[in-house]
Amino acid sequence: MQLSLACTVPLALATLAYVLRESRRARAAFAQVPPTGAVPAVGPAALLTPLLPIGLVLGAKFAGVELEINAALALAILYGVVATRPRDIAQSLSAAIVEGIRAVAPVLWLMMGIGMVVTVLMADNVTGAVGPLLARAVPHGAVSYVLVFGLLSPLALYRGPLNLYGMGAGLGAMLKAALGGPLVGGALMGSGLVQGVCDPTNTHNTWAAGFAGCDVNDVLRSTLPYAWAANVVALVWIQVAHG
């Protein structure tokens, strides 16, 4: 709970600073531009599509039935197609499948590779050989802890070694003996602020960049200073509380 609070408060303040500053810079982008083409009408029923998977899973659980999330997503996809283009169900679904495979195939290969690396890093023989070397390299003082993990936090980007949902899981297991659970968890959660907000491989960043009509790396350059600063503040908080 303390680690979550130490990361949440700085990130909330950084988010507020980002919105206040960047909204002034981009105010001109909100000028009304006349549409270049006909905008397809979307009925109120179609707007419920994103909420349908959660509603199905929670409703099934309330009724005492176990519904897999993949089944709920499939039902929501069918509902969304019927609610928007009922006459082109087959064409819409086939196009969505092809586009979905094209979008997630590189990420799937990346996650498979990360899974292999994590499995290797958590093997007993690897931990026994690499663990003592990492114990000599990890920071032990308060200032060095903040500086090292603060400066290295961008290594969480692009599914790097400090990514808690990638190689960081195996790395954290090896660092636990040298730093202790709270400090290792805090370092990985702090770097997770940078990864969760800025990483160009995140689906939400890809969608946001596509909606805004900009490159996803522009999102990285725009948000990195704020997330980086939030991570440093979180590391100071964690070091004071658990150091």
Image (cartoon, grey):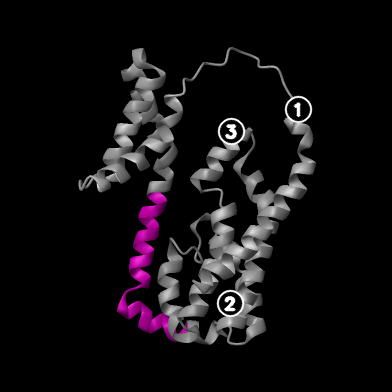
Q: Is residue 173 visible?
A: yes
**Among the 4 quarters of the image, the one containing residue 243:** bottom right
Query: Is 119 placed above or below 97 here?
Result: below
Q: Position of residue 174 (x, y in %)?
A: 42, 78
Q: Quadrant of residue 225?
A: bottom right
* Vertical relation: 195 (above or below) 36: below
Tell me, for residue 211, which label it has, or none.
3
Q: Magenta span has 55?
A: no
Q: Residue furthest left?
A: 65
Picture coordinates of residue 29 (x, y %)?
Answer: 74, 32
Bounds of the magenta segment: 109-133
Q: Are marks 1 and 3 in contact (CB under 8 Å)?
A: no
Q: Amino acid at mark 1?
A: Ala
Q: Would you call the spot at circle 2 few (<14 residues within 10 Å), some (14-19), or many (20 or more)?
A: many
Q: Position of residue 216 (x, y in %)?
A: 60, 42
Q: Nearer the viewer, residue 228 or 13?
A: 13
First of labels 1, 3 by sequence position: 1
Badge 2 or badge 3: first in the primary sequence: 3
- Determine the residue positioned at 56% across, 63% down: 155
- Visible in this render: residue 157? no
104 relative to 73 in the view: left or right: right
* Type of secondary structure dominating the magenta stretch: helix
Q: Which residue has dot 2 on it?
A: 238
Which residue position is annotated with label 1? 31
Question: Mark 2, mark 3: which one is toward the viewer?
Answer: 2
In the image, residue 121 lies in the stretch drawn in magenta: yes
Give how far apart the Cα atoms at labels 2 and 3 are: 36 Å
